[in-house]
Image (cartoon, helix red, strand yellow):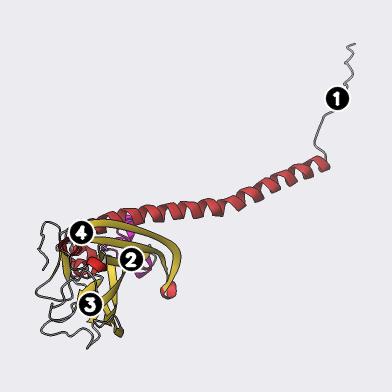
Amino acid sequence: MKFRRPHFFRAESAFTMIEIALCLAIIGFALVAIIGVLPIGMSTQRDTREETTINQDATMLLEAIRNGVRGANDLTNYVYAITNYSTYYNSLGVAGPTAQNGYTFDSASVTAPIYPLGPYSATPLTNGATIIGLLSTPEFIADAPTNFVAAASLYNLSGYSNHVVAYVRSFSGLAAEKPPQDNAIMVGDTFSYRILCVNAPVPFDTNNAFQGFSRQLAGNQRELRLTFLWPQLPGNRLGNKKQTFRASIAGQLAHDPTNHFLYFYQPQSFKPQP
């Protein structure tokens, strides 16, 4: 007759309900902290991506403007509006009429009589030359008899002070957003911004305005400033981001003889000033 050994029950360890509750509380606390950090990380990533896009676009635009490029017709896919806010000043420096000249791909409007059209008319943004020509509009334009030539200042002159703003969809970014994309939703969601374009003459001492060196320097040296403001929001609102790029350009800012609303830098051309 065989005898079986008796079975001895061993005590098995386990988690109690209190321990499980404590673990869940710790995990919940950690998840809340992680979830709280995620929006900050996503916001930082978005800001970095936007700043990278702005830097890339600024480099391209600066080079196009400073070299007076006329064949960059691809710009019509991205620069969808330009507005020039202009004020007329008499020779005493007293402000006169104001104008708001608007340009889009489909139309162009110029406020008269502040800008007498003469034999020329404003043209829509249908080619790259028009876009570059408008973005190169000088800060100061001398009135007749100088025939809308870029001026070093309005010191003792009558003329126009210009404030040019361009509305742009980013050149860089996702390929799915770029032409020939014709989906209105995709196009509307493209990162957009505004550019304040200033083509300013170098400053000079007005007490010596009629000295030869001052005239030559002011007439052949300019500073191009592009201030990027972003993001462009629905309802024509604007975000709070801002960055300015500068370039010093030696040479003439020449008036287009076929359209007195367009100007082009000629960095290899220098003209003696009277």
- In primary-sequence order, the first of circles 3 and 4 is 4
**Of discs 1 and 4, which sits in the foreground?**
4
Q: Can residue 39 be seen in this view?
A: yes
- In depth, the one of 213 and 120 nearer the eye is 213
Q: Do the residues labelled 3 and 4 touch (CB within 8 Å)?
A: no
Identify the magenta region: 169-187
Residue that mark 2 sits on: 195
Q: In which quarter of the image is the N terminus?
A: top right
Which residue type does callout 3 highlight? Asn
SS for dot 2: strand
- The disc label shown at residue 66, or none: 4
Residue that mark 1 sits on: 10
Which x, y percent locates residue 67?
17, 58
- In primary-sequence order, the first of circles 3 and 1 is 1
- In depth, the one of 80 and 254 nearer the eye is 254
Q: Give the spatial CA distance, label 3 vs label 1.
A: 106 Å
**Of discs 2 and 3, which sits in the foreground?**
3
SS for dot 3: loop
- In depth, the one of 1 and 142 nearer the eye is 142
User: In the rendered view, does 234 fall on the left or right side of 16?
Assistant: left
- The disc label shown at residue 92, or none: none
Residue that mark 3 sits on: 156
Which residue type does callout 1 highlight? Arg
Which residue type does callout 2 highlight? Ile
- In primary-sequence order, the first of circles 2 and 4 is 4
Which x, y percent locates residue 217?
19, 60
Q: How crowded is mark 4: few (under 14 residues within 10 Å), some or many (20 or more)?
A: many
Which x, y percent locates residue 264?
16, 65
SS for dot 4: helix
Q: Give the spatial CA distance, label 2 vs label 4.
A: 16 Å
